[in-house]
Amino acid sequence: MSIGIVQFGGSNCDLDVLHVLKDVIGADAELVWYKEEDLSRFDGIVVPGGFSYGDYLRAGAIAARTPIMASIKKLAEAGKPVIGICNGFQILTESGLLDGALTTNNYPKFKCESTLLRVETTDTPFTSKFKKGEVVSIPIAHMEGNFYADEETLSKLENNDQVVFRYVDKEGKVTDEANPNGSQENIAGIVSAKKNVLGMMPHPERASEEILGSKDGIKIFESMMEFISKN
């Protein structure tokens, strides 16, 4: 099993993800430069956070048009798991792999803080290690994490069980106060219709070791590896 971690100019969480995958859970993982087009050796892909190409034009818009994205689409179409974290989520929406868009936070500044998320579904390759309704602590760090979709798309996401994480309070309730960026329906993460492509604004790699204050994020990577081993 091998996981590719995509590097664009401006990626800055690639080494953190590599550390978690290789050193914390012992997976076979390697960095992949954005010009590489042959991803056939990988069983899964991580598009990490950062500021690809300085977020010029729109966050993720330039990275979404690089050659490697066509190869990631083929891999996703084959059913292999793909996860986009923060800027990676923005890239996946810009490339059409996921619905919706990430716009500027309602408080239009960069926010870096702990958030509480409710796990809405365990029926994905990324959440099988959680319990449905479990409240977990995973931090955010972004200025454009405000999830937006039109009403038709929101209904589809809800009806198809594609909303994976929601910002909540410590009791697990969806409140405006628990929503750090103004995302519709407090959405923090969604999956594709086939559920093998996940985008999320919080950073699970920053919540994967005890020294970081939370190990809740590591379950996402462990779930992904378990999915790969069974498929």
Image (spheres, rainbow, N blue to C red):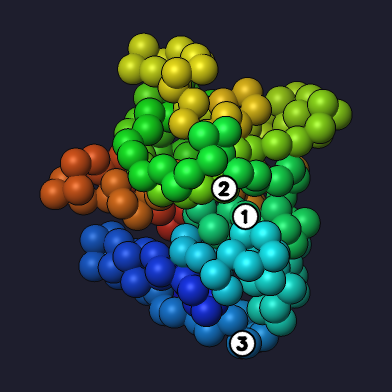
Left or right of 143: which side holds 103? Answer: right
**From the viewer's perspective, is 116 left or right of 167?**
left
Picture disc at residue 153: none
Q: State whether residue 189 is above or below residue 211.
A: above
The secondary element bearing badge 1 is classed as helix
Q: Is residue 216 left or right of residue 3?
A: left
Q: Residue at x 38, y 28 (%)?
A: 116
Inspect this view and state whether residue 187 appears: no
Mark 1, residues whose alpha carbon is within 10 Å: few (<14), some, or many (≥20)? many
Which of the pair 13/145 is nearer the observer? 145
**Disc 2 secondary structure class:** loop
Kindly identify which residue carries mark 2.
Answer: 144
**Point 36% across, 12% down: residue:** 171
Give x and y (percent) for residue 25: 28, 60
Residue 10: % across, % down:
49, 74
Residue drawn at (46%, 31%) of the image: 180
Residue closer to the observer: 57 or 192: 57
Q: Which residue is mark 1?
A: 90
Quadrant of the drawing holding the N terminus: bottom left
